[in-house]
Amino acid sequence: MAVLSQINHCEDNEETGNCFKILTDQEMVLLENNRTEIQFNKGETIIKQGTKSSDILYLKSGLVKISISSGDSSLILCIKTKNHFIGIENIYGYDYHAYTVTALEDSMICYIDTSAIRQLLKQNNNFNAELYRILTNNSLLTYDRFFSLTQKQLHGRFADILLCLSNKIFKSKKFDLPLSRKDLADLTGMAPESVIRIIKDFKTDKIIATKGKRVEILNEPLLQKISNVG
Amino acid sequence: MAVLSQINHCEDNEETGNCFKILTDQEMVLLENNRTEIQFNKGETIIKQGTKSSDILYLKSGLVKISISSGDSSLILCIKTKNHFIGIENIYGYDYHAYTVTALEDSMICYIDTSAIRQLLKQNNNFNAELYRILTNNSLLTYDRFFSLTQKQLHGRFADILLCLSNKIFKSKKFDLPLSRKDLADLTGMAPESVIRIIKDFKTDKIIATKGKRVEILNEPLLQKISNVG
DNA sequence: TAAAATATATGACATAAATCAATTTTAATA
DNA sequence: TATTAAAATTGATTTATGTCATATATTTTA
C-alpha cells in the first residue's frame, strides 16, 4: 500500500508542461517547423487503434480518453489532460497505434513529426531525460491502475477513479464530469449498471453529491479508506 | 483484436540481448567498472517493493517474476527471461521500486549503477534509442495484459498466459513450469482453485497435457481461439 | 416545439468465479 | 526413511457482479 499510494492513478497536469522550456531557441524553431495544430470537437476520434503513425501528439488544451477495444469490450487506459504527450509509445519501434484516442472535451492537438522528436532527443540530453521521466512515470501509473482493476472490488475501483478525477484531473472537490456512465464503466472495468449503483451507494453514504454532470467529493478520507481496503 | 494480436503478452527473449553490442569498447569499459554480478537462488527476493534504488538490474540468466502486492492480494505484472532489464522505470525520476522481483529459477543478476546507464544514454544515441524501444515495448505489453485481465474471462486469460509461456518465455510446446498454482493465479488475476479447474478443463479437452511440472501444448489453434473470444 | 434517439436509472434474475472445508499429493526436513 | 509441512486437488456453497427487461430522464434532431 505504501508504495502504491506514493505514486498515483493519474498524472499531474503540470508535469509535462515544462518539457519544452528545456529546449533552446534553435531547437524550438526545429519543433515549430515540424508541427501542425488541429482542433478536435468533443466526441471526435483523434487516433484510431490500429492506424499507422508518423507523429507524436501533444495535447495543448482539452481532455481525451485513451482506450483499447476488441469485439464489444473496451478498456479506458487513462484520461489525459492538457500538456501531455499522446502516442509516445511510438517514438522508436512499434509503428501502429495500440489504442484509440477520443476527445472528451474540445481539444487542441499538436502533431509533431516523430523524426523531429528523435532529433531533439538526440541533441538535448535534458529533453531526453524529461521524456524518459514521462514514459517511466506513465508505466508506473499503468501498473497502479492495473493493480486497482484486477485486485480491488467495484467500490474500491470506483473510489480510485473518483480520487484521481478530483486530485489529478480537475484538481478540485467539485467538477463537471465529461464522462458517460459507459465511460466510467470502461475506466473501472465494470458494467454501466454497476457504476450507477455505486454512485447511488456513495450518495446515500454522503461520500459524494451529484447534480447532473456536477460531482462533488464530500468525504475524501472515507473515499481514501475505501480505496485502501479495496 | 488485430492490433492486440500483433503485439503480444511477453517480450521476446532475444530482444534486449543485443543492446550492449551497440556500445563502443570505451563504453563497455565504463559499464564494466560500474557493474556487479550477484547470484540469486530460486525463490529468493531480488528486489523488494518500496526499497530505494540506485541501480538498474539486468538479468543475465535465469527467470524472475515481477509483482505488486498490497495487503494479501498480489499481482504478477510479468515474467522476465534472461537478457532483460529490470527496474528501468527508475532510470530518471522515481527513486523507489514499485514492485517486488523474485527468482523463479536460479538467476544471475547484473547490478548497473544508474548514473553509468545515464552516461551511456547521453553519449550513445543508438543505445538511447534501444532503451526507448525496450521501455515503450514494455508499455505496450502491459496494456495488452491489462486488457486481458480486465476484459476476458478465466479461460481466455489462462489461454493468454499459456500462449505467452509457450511462444515467448520457453519457446517450445513443451516446458517445465517453474510457477506454482498461486503464481499462475497471481499472473491471471484469479483464485488458485480456478487455475486448477481450468487446467483440468483444458486437459479433458485435449488442449494441453501435464505431468508433474511438465506442460505440453497440444492444440494451439484452439488455445488462440479461446484467447480471442475471451 | 414535438418527436425520436440516446443516456440514465431501477429491480429481478442469472452466473462466473471466489470462498470454504476436506482430502490427497508432493516436497521439505529431522 | 519417517515425519512434517506445504502445495495441489476436489466438491459444496456463497457472493459479487453481470445481464436482461423496463421505466424514466435527458439530449438531439426534425
Image (tube, coloured by chain):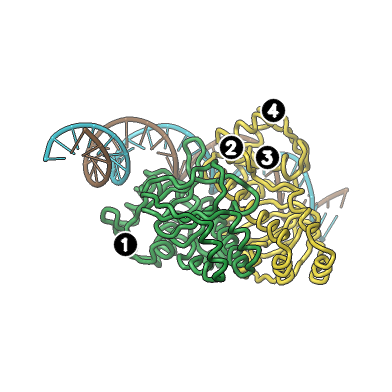
Chain colours: A yellow, B green, C brown, D cyan
Residue bearing the label numbered 1: B216
Task: Give how far across and how far down residue B42 sits, in percent.
Answer: 36, 49
Please tell me in which quadrant of the rendered image residue A125 appears.
bottom right
Q: Secondary structure at mark 4?
A: loop
Residue bearing the label numbered 3: A162
Q: Is residue B146 visible?
A: no
Please tell me in which quadrant of the rendered image residue A202 appears.
top right
Marks 2 and 3 sit apart, C-alpha to C-alpha, by: 10 Å
The 10 Å Cα crowd at callout 3, few under 14, some 14 to 19, many 20 or more, is many
Q: Secondary structure at mark 3?
A: helix
Residue bearing the label numbered 2: A156
Q: Quadrant of the N terminus of chain A?
A: top right
D21 sits to left or right of D28:
left
Q: Secondary structure at mark 2?
A: helix
Q: Chain of mark 3?
A: A
Say yes or no: labels 2 and 4 on the same chain: yes
Q: Chain of mark 1?
A: B
Say yes or no: labels 4 and 1 on the same chain: no
Q: Chain of mark 2?
A: A
Q: Chain of mark 4?
A: A
Marks 1 and 2 sit apart, C-alpha to C-alpha, by: 39 Å
Q: Quadrant of the C terminus of chain A?
A: top right
Task: Give how far across and how far down residue B52 sits, in percent.
Answer: 56, 43
Label located before the other in sequence (2 or 3):
2
